[in-house]
Image: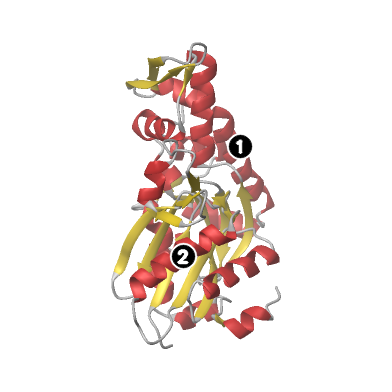
C-alpha cells in the first residue's frame, strides 16, 4: 500500500504512536486544552496534561477517552490529527492508520473509531483488538492452534482475552484499571487521613509504593495536599500496605473478571492455558505483586511481559510490517468510501 504505515494506541491515559521503519516515536497524555471563550485549541498532550488541576476558568482541559472508548469525538480527532500531521508533514500520499480498540466494543464504537481515523487524515484505516496487539508485542505467535490468555491492564479498562488461531476466542472488558486505582487512593486518603489530593499525586503514590498484597516491603512516603476539614495545606504519611487496602476492591474485581473468562474457556483451550499461563501487559502490570495475586486467585502461573507498557504498540508494529497478516487474522484496511457504508 502507498503511504506511511502508522499504528496508534489510543488509550484512556496516553496516546502511543508507532511508525513502520522508525519504531515507537512518541507517547503523550490523552489530553487537550481549549480556551473556554473562543474555543480555540491551546495545547495537546504533555502541555495540556500539565494544566490539569491548575488551569484558570479561561482554560478547559479535556480528557477525551473514558474507559477505553471515545467520550469527546472532536477532542480525540484533534489529538489524532495533530500527531498524523506531525508525522506526515507534506507527504503526497495519505497514511495508513492502524488503531487499537478494546476487546469488547460495539459496532457503533468500531464505526466511530474508523470515522475518527479517516477524518483525522488517514487514507485507509484498520482496527485491531488490543489483546491481540498485546500478545503480538509479547512475542506470542497468535496464529497457532494454541490458547494463550492475555490480560492488558491499561488506564481505563482491563482487557482479558483468550487468543487462538489469530483471533479472540473469549474476552471480557473490565471497566477497572489504573485510573480506578488512583481514585481509590484519593478516597482512602480523604476518608482515613482527612487529606485531599489530586489524581497526579495519587498516581505518584501508586507508582512509587503501590502493591497488590498485604505485608509487602513496607515502603512509606510523605504526600502533600490540603486538609479535608479546614482546607489548609497539609501533609501525611502513607505506607505500602495502605495502598493495597485502598485498591483491594478494584483488584478483586479484576481477578473476578479473569476467573469468569477462565470458567467460560473450552476444556482444550483451558489445558493450553495451564501450560502457557497468563501474560500481563499494560501499565497496570507494573504494580508490585499483581502477578502473584492473580496466580494465587486463579491457580494459573502468571508472568509479566517484557516491557509491558509498550507491548500493544510493539504488537502493532509487527502487524504493520505485514498487512496481509492482518487480513489472515480477519482485519482489513478500509477507505473513506468503505467506512461510510461500514456495517459490523
Residue under the point 48% across and 34% down: 182
Residue drawn at x 47%, y 50% as measured from the top left = 35
In this rendering, would 134 be left or right of 108? left
Location of mark 1 (residue) = 253
User: Residue at 62% of width from left, 66% of height from top?
Assistant: 112
Query: Is 116 rendered above or below residue 198?
Result: below
Image position, residue 340 (x, y; %): 66, 79
Horizontal and vertical percent position of residue 73:
58, 60
User: Which of the numbered marks, if any, corresponds to residue 25?
Assistant: none
Q: Quadrant of residue 96 in the image?
A: bottom left
- The answer to whether residue 139 is seen in the rendering is no
Nearer to us: label 2 or label 1: 2
Near-viewer residue (5 or 318): 5
Way the structure is coloured = secondary structure
Where disc 1 sits, the SS reads helix
Q: Residue furthest left?
A: 22
Residue pointed to by mark 2: 80
Pick whichever, 164 or 33, lies toward us: 33
- Quote the CA–CA distance across marks 2 and 1: 32 Å
Q: Quadrant of the N terminus?
A: bottom left
Q: Where residue 301 appears, x then y in whole percent?
A: 47, 45
Instruction: Please say if 28 is above or below 239.
Output: below
Residue 20 at x, y = what percent? 34, 75
Pick the quarter of the image with the C terminus: bottom right
Q: Nearer the viewer, residue 89 or 20?
A: 89
Amino acid at each position: 500500500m502507498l503511504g506511511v504505515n502508522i499504528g496508534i494506541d489510543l488509550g484512556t491515559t496516553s496516546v502511543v504512536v508507532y511508525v513502520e521503519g522508525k519504531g515507537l516515536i512518541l507517547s503523550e497524555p490523552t489530553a487537550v486544552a481549549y480556551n473556554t471563550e473562543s474555543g480555540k485549541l491551546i495545547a495537546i498532550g504533555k502541555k495540556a496534561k500539565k494544566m490539569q488541576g491548575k488551569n484558570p476558568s479561561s482554560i478547559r482541559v479535556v480528557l477525551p477517552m473514558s474507559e477505553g472508548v471515545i467520550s469527546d469525538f472532536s477532542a480525540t480527532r484533534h489529538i489524532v490529527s495533530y500527531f498524523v500531521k506531525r508525522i506526515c508533514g507534506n507527504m503526497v500520499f495519505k497514511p495508513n492508520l492502524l488503531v487499537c480498540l478494546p476487546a469488547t466494543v460495539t459496532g457503533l464504537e468500531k464505526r466511530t473509531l474508523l470515522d475518527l481515523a479517516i477524518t483525522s487524515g488517514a487514507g485507509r484505516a484498520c482496527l485491531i483488538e488490543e489483546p491481540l496487539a498485546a500478545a503480538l508485542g509479547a512475542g506470542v505467535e497468535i496464529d497457532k492452534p494454541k490458547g494463550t490468555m492475555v490480560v492488558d491492564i491499561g488506564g481505563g479498562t482491563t482487557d482479558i482475552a483468550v487468543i487462538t488461531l489469530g483471533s479472540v476466542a473469549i474476552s471480557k472488558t473490565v471497566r477497572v484499571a489504573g485510573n480506578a486505582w488512583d481514585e481509590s487512593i484519593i478516597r482512602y486518603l480523604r476518608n482515613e487521613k482527612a487529606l485531599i489530593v489530586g489524581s497526579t499525586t495519587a498516581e505518584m503514590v501508586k507508582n512509587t509504593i503501590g502493591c497488590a498484597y498485604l505485608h509487602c516491603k513496607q515502603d512509606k512516603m510523605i504526600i502533600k495536599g490540603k486538609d479535608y476539614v479546614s482546607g489548609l495545606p497539609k501533609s501525611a504519611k502513607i505506607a505500602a500496605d495502605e495502598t493495597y487496602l485502598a485498591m483491594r476492591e478494584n483488584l478483586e474485581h479484576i481477578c473476578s473478571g479473569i476467573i469468569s473468562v477462565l470458567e467460560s474457556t473450552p476444556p482444550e483451550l483451558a489445558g493450553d492455558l495451564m501450560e502457557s499461563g497468563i501474560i500481563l501487559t499494560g501499565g497496570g502490570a507494573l504494580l508490585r505483586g499483581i502477578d502473584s495475586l492473580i496466580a494465587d486467585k486463579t491457580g494459573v502461573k502468571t508472568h509479566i511481559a517484557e516491557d509491558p507498557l509498550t507491548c500493544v504498540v510493539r504488537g502493532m508494529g509487527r502487524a504493520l510490517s505485514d498487512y496481509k497478516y492482518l487480513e489472515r487474522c480477519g482485519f482489513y484496511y478500509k477507505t473513506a468510501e468503505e467506512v461510510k457504508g461500514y456495517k459490523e
